[in-house]
Image (cartoon, rainbow, N blue to C red):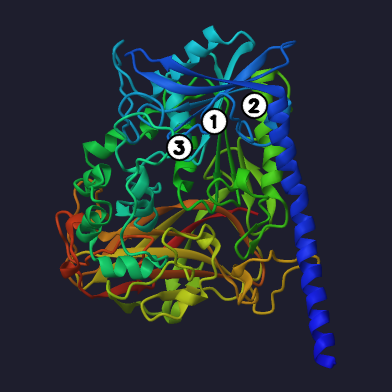
Amino acid sequence: MKTNCFKLLLLALVLLVFGQTFLLAQPARQQAEDLAKYIQQNYSKREVMIPMRDGVRLFTSIYEPKDKTQKYPIMLNRTPYTVSPYGADKFKTSLGPDELFPREGYIFVYQDVRGRWMSEGEFVNVRPDIENKTDKDIDESTDTFDTVEWLLKDIVSDNGRVGIYGISYPGFYTSAGIIDSHPAIKAASPQAPVSDWFHGDDMHHNGALILAQNYAFFRNFGQPRPVPVSNGDSLKKWTGRETQDAYDYFLKTGGLKEVADSYEKSLGIRIGFWDEMMAHPTYDDWWKARNILPKLKNVKTAVMTVGGWYDNENLYGALRTYEHIERQNPGIYNVLVMGPWFHGGWIRSDGDWLGTAYFGAKTGVDYRSRFELPFFNHFLKDKGDISQIKEVNVFDTGANVWKSFENYSPAVSSDTALYLTENGGLSFETPKTRSGYNEYVSDPLKPVPYTQKITLNYPRDYMTEDQRFASTRPDVLVYQTEPLTEDVTVAGDIKNSLTISSSGTDSDFVVKLIDVFPDDYKFPENVKPPETSAFSVFQPGGYQMLLRGDIMPARFRNSFEKPEALKPNEPTKLNFTMPGVAHTFKKGHRIMIQIQSTWFPLVSRNPQKFMPNYKLASAADFQKAAQRVYFGANASAIVLPVVKK
């Protein structure tokens, strides 16, 4: 009888929890359904082929308000990821940058870029911009210009103003579209834009190949598209080893030579762009042509660049796009918004949680109403209050508040060295104790995993993940401060100044900046973590919250164009800059630094011997290396941009 009562009670509790979860999900689902219905009732759709100056036609979907009593601005999104659904009677369920725009009233235009999906022409990855163009030259800037020119002549209900926007690769097309921009483009928002695939975006970091996510991405995206298509039926299917464990998969696949060959084994074809990347291991003219940052000139529009502090793909692109536009186009309206978001999280989430990190507010919802809609409304409709949008708008991920500065790498901060000391210490004071080194053995056959949640792609919250899983490994060095006696706020780029040596002739070095929570820390009483697997074994007390991590190959320590071998066991300086943070280390917390030489399979493994082209390394080239990191005065420090009190 007691057993039956217990079962009934347990069933009641399960139903109660399920019911609450269902009810909580209902409003969001209902809102999405209502928005989709509103779009079908209030917008008409047509599909056109817009001719470019060289005769190539680009497939374009146009959604226009049925209400013709007023004029509307045009919102243009150019994408390599399809403008589907195709068919004039098939509608998107949301339009514009976010859910607030359809009811606001805009003309929404979506375009398959040249050579993708239903557009004609040849697709070129991050197509280089052509300087001093002739009338016959084409690039993404001219395709945007020609598209805008055609739209203004064809659409009768537009008000003569155009806004462009996009996240990730579409962010690249937004940036490219404002080079020598069409005068009708009045507002542009490159969001997490691809910018420089060699130094810092989702393809490489400082020349080190970002492996797992790109391998999965190009498995489909890299396949040729000989004729226009409206679906993926023509794509060759993956027939390789079916596993979600990328650590195991890439460990057994081998070096980058075997990784490149595995495409052919699993798909029956080679991936052309992957092979091109393998042939260009240094920052040569091929990569320089594909770096859009120095080409962001003659921008005539207002720009709001958006990014996430925990964007594992294009954090670098957001920060550097803002900086280059600011430097190369003085006097224009150019602002930056950085929040506590994963890739696209400002649109795709509420923004209060990311994995086990809590930010105290629905920052994504806040962004959409406070920044995005007012920005476009102001410049395209002469409405919308932008007084609250400052030059640089950043969310402090430790204090959980929005802050503003007059520039990135703000003038209110000062570069402050945090020195590595003996016994795994960190100090803001120049060490007076003895100098020395810490040593570990890096083995490419037993690399340090970058996350506990290894999948074939990557978990989007690994950039806030608890690092306790790594800090106990013998091939990870750990340094930390004593508990802080006062808050320390950091805002801007992080500069690593290490003295290292290796028994090998080449090695990578990874530096991770971590906020260590007190052992007795608990979430606020009124805060309940979301029901996710991230919390299955997580304890907030002692949380080692990753804030920033990046990798630097020693071969590029003096030049990305001319790599140099290390001299075995000879100390040398290794300096590099990591994309910044805006974070307050609270009183009672500790600042931690972890240093290691593998970060797998996020980053491909260094064979740890110098090769003219490390991307041709096979499994037979891997070797162990004894790594030393030196501490003491004038040895190693992490330079933090500490905000002055």
Which of discs 2 and 3 lies nearer the camera? The answer is 3
Amino acid marked by disc 1: Tyr
Give yes or no for contact between labels 2 and 3 (Cβ–Cβ under 8 Å). Answer: no
Q: Answer with mark 2 or mark 3, whichever residue precedes in sequence.
A: 3
The residue identified by callout 1 is 165
Q: What x and y, as percent, mark residue 306?
A: 56, 39
The residue identified by callout 2 is 376
The residue identified by callout 3 is 81
Q: Which element is circle 1 on?
A: strand
466 up-or-down from 150: above or below? below
Q: Quadrant of residue 358?
A: bottom right
Which of discs 3 and 1 lies nearer the camera? The answer is 3
Q: Quadrant of the C terminus?
A: bottom right
Q: Quadrant of residue 534?
A: bottom right
Give how far apart the Cα atoms at labels 2 and 3 are.
23 Å
Q: Nearer the viewer, residue 626 or 342?
A: 342
Q: Nearer the viewer, residue 330 or 80?
A: 80
Query: Which residue is rendered at x = 73% and y = 48% of the image?
Result: 28
Amino acid marked by disc 2: Phe
Residue 459 seen in this snapshot: yes
Q: Which element is circle 2 on?
A: helix
Give yes or no for contact between labels 1 and 2 (Cβ–Cβ under 8 Å). Answer: yes
